């Protein structure tokens, strides 16, 4: 067995490590570069984040409801015919269900009704259940044309003794001004604001 000089062994190790590093760098450079994801949020039109609840507001407890499962996470849902898809490289800044709940809570802060969420302390005279049945952008004609955002909500109001006050469906259809994500998000803003505005007026009428 031939023993190589120590200097030769060290040199061969350095050459091998250098070649391995070049191979790795070549592999990394071949990986595709992904486009950055654009994040969007919405808020109900007219909702004031600094609104102070009225001292004589009627307490209404918001019970657990449902949200359209396909649209509940942070992806922006579109529907064309019988096919559903999500907008590429674009997402809500948080799950749409959470953003919708925040918009509802902020809007009720300025109303004659004080909304109590699960986990909050306080006595209540009524309970409100909200089920979001549709939260989507529909391409109902040309797939390249601006879609119509549809937000449909079912509300049920009961007294604290569980007697029913009433149930109502609220729907808003707002066509985006262009087939661009920013304009589609703007249509979501208007649709959410319209639906929540109707909901508050109905809840105030039923609870007062």
Image (cartoon, grey):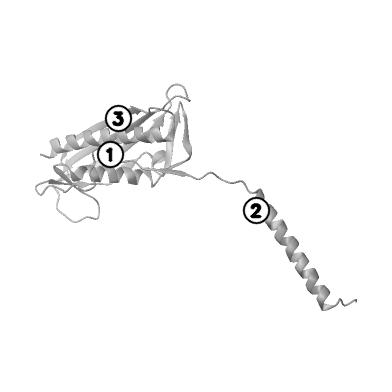
> Quadrant where the N terminus lies?
bottom right
Identify the disc placed on residue 28.
2
Q: Position of residue 84 (x, y in %)?
A: 46, 33
**Local SS, label 2:** helix
Q: Outermost residue toward the top?
A: 141
Give the vertical position of 171 relative to 101 (above or below): above
Q: Which of the two residues, 64 or 150, is positioned nearer the viewer here? A: 150
Identify the disc placed on residue 44.
1
**Local SS, label 3:** strand
Residue drawn at (33%, 33%) of the image: 151
Q: Is residue 31 left or right of residue 38?
A: right
Q: Nearer the viewer, mark 2 or mark 1?
A: 2
Q: Position of residue 64 (x, y in %)?
A: 28, 46
Identify the disc placed on residue 172.
3
Question: Mark 2 packing: few (<14 Cα in 10 Å), some, or many (20+)?
Answer: few
Q: Which of the two residues, 46 or 102, is positioned nearer the viewer here? A: 46
Q: Nearer the viewer, mark 3 or mark 1?
A: 1
Question: Mark 3 packing: few (<14 Cα in 10 Å), some, or many (20+)?
Answer: many
């Amino acid at each position: 067995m031939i023993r190589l000089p120590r200097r030769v062994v060290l040199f061969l190790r350095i050459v091998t490590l250098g070649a391995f590093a070049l191979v790795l760098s070549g592999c990394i450079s071949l990986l595709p570069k992904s486009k950055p994801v654009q994040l969007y949020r919405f808020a109900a039109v007219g909702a004031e984040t600094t609104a102070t609840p009225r001292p004589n507001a009627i307490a209404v407890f918001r019970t657990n409801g449902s949200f359209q499962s396909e649209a509940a996470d942070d992806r922006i849902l579109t529907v064309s015919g019988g096919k559903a898809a999500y907008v590429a490289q674009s997402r809500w800044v948080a799950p749409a269900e959470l953003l919708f709940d925040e918009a509802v809570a902020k809007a009720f802060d300025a109303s004659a009704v004080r909304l109590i969420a699960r986990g909050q302390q306080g006595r209540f005279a009524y309970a409100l259940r909200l089920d979001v049945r549709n939260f989507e952008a529909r391409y109902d004609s040309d797939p390249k044309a601006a879609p119509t955002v549809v937000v449909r909500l079912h509300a049920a109001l009961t007294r604290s003794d569980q007697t029913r006050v009433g149930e109502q469906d609220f729907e808003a259809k707002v066509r985006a001004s262009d087939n661009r994500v920013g304009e589609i998000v703007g249509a979501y803003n208007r649709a959410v604001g319209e639906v929540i505005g109707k909901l508050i007026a109905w809840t105030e009428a039923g609870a007062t």
